[in-house]
Image (cartoon, coloured by chain):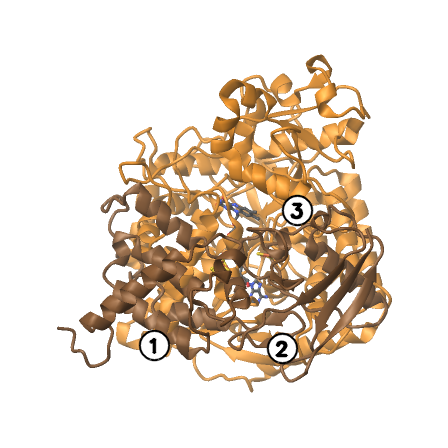
Chain colours: A brown, B orange
Amino acid sequence: MKLTLHVWRQSGPRDEGRFETHRMDDVSPSMSFLDLLDMVNETITLEGGEPIAFEHDCREGICGSCGMMVNGVAHGPDDLITACQLHMRSFEDGDEIWIEPWRADAFPVMKDLVVDRSAFDRIVEAGGYISVRTGSAPDAHAVPVPKPDADRAFDAAACIGCGACVAACPNASAMLFTAAKAAHLSYLPQGQTERLERAMGMVATHDEEGFGNCTNHGACQVACPKGISVDYIARLNRDLMKATLTGVGMEGSGGD
Amino acid sequence: MELDAKIPSGPIEKKWEKHQFDMKLVNPANKRKYKVIMVGTGLAGGSAAATMGELGYDVHCFTFHDSPRRAHSIAAQGGINAAKNYQGDGDSIYRLFYDTVKGGDFRSREANVYRLAELSLNIIDQAVAQGVPFAREYGGLLANRSFGGAQVSRTFYARGQTGQQLLLGCYQALERQVAEGTVTMYNRHEMLDVIVIDGRARGIVTRHLVTGKIEAHMADAVILGTGGYSNVFFLSTNAKGCNVTATWRATKRGAGFANPCFTQIHPTCIPQSGEYQSKLTLMSESLRNDGRIWVPKKAGDDRPPHQIPDSERDYYLERLYPAFGNLTPRDIASRRAKEMVDAGHGVGPRKNGVYLDFRDAIERMGKDAVSERYGNLFQMYAKITGEDPYEVPMRIYPAPHYTMGGLWVDYNLMTTVPGLFAIGEANFSDHGANRLGASALMQGLADGYFVIPLTIGNYLADGPQGGVDGNHPAARDAVREVTEMQERLLAVNGNRSVDSFHMELGRLMWNHCGMSRNEADLKEALEKIPELRQRYWREVRVPGSGADLNQSLEKAGRVADFLEFAEMMCWDALTRDESCGAHYREEHTTEEGEARRDDENFAHGAVWEFRGAGEEPVRHREELTFEYVPLSQRSYK
Ligand SMILES: Cc1cc2nc3c(=O)[nH]c(=O)nc-3n(C[C@H](O)[C@H](O)[C@H](O)COP(=O)(O)OP(=O)(O)OC[C@H]3O[C@@H](n4cnc5c(N)ncnc54)[C@H](O)[C@@H]3O)c2cc1C
Ligand code: SF4
Ligand code: FES
């Protein structure tokens, strides 16, 4: 296959950035999208240029490192996969492909296709856990969990933290990511004690980090490679409401 | 190099309990005064950092990833073993211990393995309490499966994403400590050296991967949880970033490296589709429960599979091992597949695989039942290859997957450098010459949650080391050496990319020190590796500068280390003049073509001391004794 690639190049956060065009003549349909970028980089290197920076690690859709807009779509044209799982057979000979980083204020571009997603860590830091000291846990069978709850928790826990939801959202909201973490824990009996505080803490940090508000657009769910449902956002909003009404997690509420 | 394993006295089931009592404690009020460096945030490093933070130590945790959650552990699929005996099928700590020692082909340390089996119980409790969504039965209790040929169902799993869910549990515990202020995270920092002062590990040198800043970080102790080195083969199932740099640079500072030639090859991976390919994908071993493995009887047969009648197919595992059939252990299934391909029976466009066929399973139980069991794996296969495994048999081929070798550690998980510890896949400890399925996650978490947080206290209790900072001459020297190496790499300015050298090294290692090995090949490799290394330093091109995000430079340092480390691996494979577990020397086989151990001469761990790049390293031994599991030969006939 012959392809024309327009790749976003930006030397650092302060650079304006621009597209750079590469014509590739010898693309095999069984290549993965990242194999293709490797091939482009090999050529650039031998020609004396600087290769395109992009993040990747597992190359099988689980680590959440890779992420880029391919022809304006997060992770590219196919459903329910990450960019590293995209294969060139999804394109046609002669196609032009535009490749860009995630675009969101809370994800500043560091170089080329690499953005800073550390805000996600800080959202988790703000309560996305169950407080249990190592060694203090009761026997794993002490608390049975109904299978439907365990399955629902799992569906939410499948989030890989890639950030496609943010990139796809017209408001650059990270509510799908935040809600997925909250739902994972709130479906489990272990997660109940801290449930409302967790909701308050994570959403407050979400807002502080500069992510936009959720206006129920739904683009996040479409972009998500793991099929995380927007229903979790409604669930998180209900928890938030409850927390506000009961004063949980509010400073100075005194706790009773 | 002194190798005292410091195994506690007493009966095996009491050793850890006794040791916990005998170890010195650090006063809780003083813990904050001790600074501990943790490198790595995989299951081992993440769990250790979180737990040490909870205990009150001043933990500084480093990873080259952009977030702790991205560590390679995230990719583990199948599950984690624990001797809970929730199925009431006769499992016990002792049985898990026994299976692990035997599975490791008698090249691991009994005392460590026993402790691992003991701690497996606590891991599951801890993970469940954190909210890890393990598979459950309708009654709400945890489900188990049997994995990798085990005769009991002791594997806990979370769909095909067990590693991900366990790592998220660790990561959340870690972030909680970050919020509490007990752990300081250093993301996008690559550790490039260990600082040793007066014979003790006192710090590390890191490069900030975005700003390029190279600096020293000092501490009272340093722990490496930096994973395995399967990527020495270039193509492996490991994440692209996995590398040997941290453990290798520790080796260069005096830590002994044990059994580097013990590398595990996984039988069911998707074969390479072209030279451009950068990574191999593992297909879960569970597929062998219902898929039948075959190749055409006639070498070079080009007919599509459905046109090859049964009489012209060789179901070679069923033929050779009637009792175990397609479920023979990993190493055997892998070697037989390679032999078939080498003899010209390979299938697929590149003739580099064997068939794993579900035709009969679909006939027997129906497509729905097959899809119920393997649906997502079939989907994954179809995504990658563009072929539908319901219609066309899957193609599989073995690939490097896991490394049993690693830094030598004693019972306290301390290396031969006092104050330097190694946990998880980075150490050599518990799997001997062959790891059982679902045991790596168990070991990483046992080390991280339950062993190191206690043994580190025993080391630190002698009092804070204090008194050194980044201006210490040893720290400044280390920083200078790291900087110089980087400048040298950037200055070569040759005409070949880093990747092209990595691929060349990978091919050489796969052909000469891969699934089966012999003296002539290994000797040849020992001549070729230094040549390749010299060419690397003359011909590599590392574009860009050291002062910003430069992924070529990151890779260049890692490949430079692989090029040195590979030689130690070959020395180990050459001098271990026996076959055992995953180490298969063609000269040492039984009449049935299986690995033949030589317990008289090789019932030891080989621990290598670095003497200089290109110089023959020194081989030391830790003798192994088997008091509880009697030495016996494996047989799967
Ligand atoms: C595809 C696949 C499937 C698997 N499935 C299973 C399974 O089902 N069951 C099982 O038990 N095992 C499985 N394994 C094996 C298991 O996943 C690994 O052995 C285990 O996760 C290793 O954990 P770790 O914490 O030791 O290292 P890793 O998870 O590899 O973590 C290493 C950490 O060290 C950091 N690091 C490394 N070098 C440096 C450096 N120089 N500077 C800074 N940071 C550094 C990395 O950033 C990372 O955080 C599987 C492996 C693969 C490849
Ligand atoms: S919710 Fe989906 S798109 Fe968003 S970070 Fe998680 S996996 Fe990625
Ligand atoms: S590289 Fe890991 S998800 Fe794509």
Which mark, by number, is residue B280? 3
Q: In the image, which is nearer the foreground, mark 2 or mark 1?
A: 1
| On-image quarter of the N terminus of chain B | bottom right
Q: Residue B478 carries which label?
A: 2
Query: Where B156 falls versus A163 (above or below)?
Result: above
Check disc 2 and report its element: helix, strand or loop.
Answer: helix
Q: Can residue A25 be seen in this view?
A: yes
Indicate if the residue with disc 2 has its beta carbon within 8 Å of ligand 1.
no
Q: Residue at x 55, y 19 (%)?
A: B363
Chain of residue at mark 2: B
Whole-number angstrom distance, CA of label 2 to CA of label 1: 27 Å
In screen coordinates, is B292 left or right of A98?
left
- Tell me the subunit letter for badge 1: B
The residue under label 1 is B32
* Image position, residue B273 (x, y; %): 74, 43
Amino acid type at mark 2: Ala
Q: Nearer the viewer, residue B66 or B9?
A: B66
User: Residue at (66%, 66%) from the top-left corner?
Assistant: A54
Give amino acid for label 1: Arg
Q: Considering only order in the chain, which callout, 1 or 2, is on the residue closer to the N terminus?
A: 1
Relative image position of residue B599 (x, y in whole percent) = 57, 34
Q: Do the residues labelled 3 and 2 touch (CB within 8 Å)?
A: no
